[in-house]
Amino acid sequence: MPVLIIPGVYETWRFLQPLITTLHGRGHPVFVLDQLRHNRKPVADAARLVEAFLESEGLDDVVLVAHSKGGLAGKRVMSGPAGSRVRGMVAVATPFGGSRYARLFLVPSLRSFSPTDPGILELGRNTGVNDRIVSIYGEFDPHIPESSELPGARKNVRLETGGHFRVLADPRVIAEVVALAEG
């Protein structure tokens, strides 16, 4: 089962290297998008890059593995015309409902995570793909105090650890990706 990695804001795919190595070791072809660079583009633009990549590579039945903002881009892909190419997504520490702290930032790439941002509201209204998403999050996330619980998700996994980045190292993340990719 092919896996496509979508990093969070200010991250490259290399940030998720431990997950990539494990998945590749299990025999999954893992794809990354160098075009995302540090993922500072608006969510809609990042989603268009993912859609174009899926099409150009002819990838179908793909599992998306996303961190933070990457999960928003992944949900947007799943909600659009390329959504039929995606089996599902494991989204780690994704601000599906936004973050109240986003209002405090002047930088547009962070301010767009506000709970009142039109893009966040649109994704929240589009619940048709939630049942194909596994949302994983810590018991406390300093970047997303509202939590990353996704109503109607295939599964919401609340880890007993905290943090926005530390959760990526939790063994349950790999277990959930493997369950989705190999199930």
Image (tube, rainbow, N blue to C red):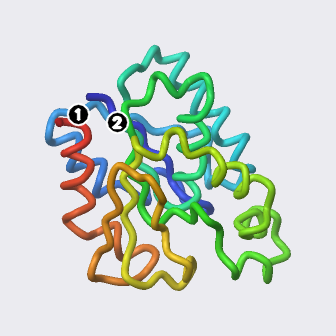
In this rendered view, identify the residue nearer to me: 166 or 73: 73
Q: Residue at x 36, y 76 (%)?
A: 166
Marks 2/1: CA–CA distance: 7 Å
**Above or below 97: residue 2:** above
Residue 157 in the image, given as x and y percentages of width and height? 31, 65
Residue 28's mark?
1
Residue 78 in the image, given as x and y percentages of width and height? 53, 35
Quadrant in which the N terminus is drawn: top left
Q: Residues within 10 Å of mark 1 (few under 14, many from 20)?
A: some
Q: Earlier in the sequence, mark 2 or mark 1?
A: 2
Answer whether labels 2 and 1 touch (C-beta < 8 Å). Answer: yes
Name the amino acid, label 1.
His
Question: Would you identify the image quadrant in which residue 5 lies?
Answer: top left
Q: Residue at x 29, y 54 (%)?
A: 19
Q: Which residue is mark 2?
A: 3
Question: Would you identify the image quadrant in which residue 179 lies?
Answer: top left
